[in-house]
Image (cartoon, rainbow, N blue to C red):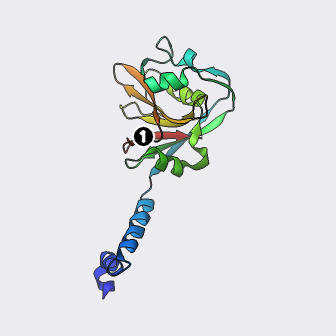
Amino acid sequence: MSEMRGPLGELCDQCSGTNGRARFEEFKLWLKKAVALLTHLSDTSLGSVKKFVAAENFTKRNTKVKFWDFGSNFEAHFLGKTERNVSAAVIAVHRLERASLDPEIMTELGEKRISTLAHFYQLIEAQGQGQAGTLLVNGYANIAYIEDDNGVLWAVNADWSSGRGWGVGAGSIGSPSGWGAGFRVVSR
């Protein structure tokens, strides 16, 4: 009989009875995985960097990039950062398909989730005046997971504000605030 009622009828049959609640929870987990969290958009090759000093690049005096704001977490945890001998890398660019928290996004990215500040800066510099390119320039966030000098992982984000420039911030990966669908996520 459930054959004639289709998939929804089958689900209702399986979710009734003593194990119904557990079966329904299993279905919700399956459904969550069935809808992709990230869609791969492109890969971008970035060059090696012998020495990257954040404070020399992330500054409003930078003539290559129009910066208008740096969040307090970014200033406190990244402006003192220096990266040395950063290897060339291929950076994957993804679109976030549904609102999500950092742990869920990082799980989907796997081991290649951690980026370098030097490479994130290279992406921003390539669109320094808000021109089209790999990153979004529509006010939506571009997110990368980057460690500070103490090895603490942060969600570093950059967004272009028309008429003002790039704003760069850093948020705790344990934050209850999530990221919206349509945002971009970059990783190795």
Q: Residue 108, percent across and down?
A: 52, 51
Find residue 150 and report its image quarter.
Answer: top right
Find residue 83 and report its image quarter.
Answer: top right
Residue 184 appearing in the image: yes
Residue at the image point whose x is 39% and y is 68% from the top: 25
Crowd rating for badge 1 (residues with CA inside 10 Å; few <14, some 14–19, many 20+): few
Q: Residue 54, percent across and down?
A: 57, 20
Find residue 113 and report its image quarter.
Answer: top right
Residue at the image point whose x is 54% and y is 48% from the top: 109
Q: Which residue is mark 1?
A: 175
Residue at the image point whose x is 42% and y is 64% from the top: 29
Residue 39 appearing in the image: no
Q: Residue furthest bottom?
A: 1
Q: Residue furthest top?
A: 61
Q: Of the residues shown, which amino acid type is indicated by label 1?
A: Ser
Between 86 and 65, the one nearer to me in the picture? 86
Q: Residue 178, percent across and down?
A: 39, 43
Q: Image check: 116 left or right of 157? A: right
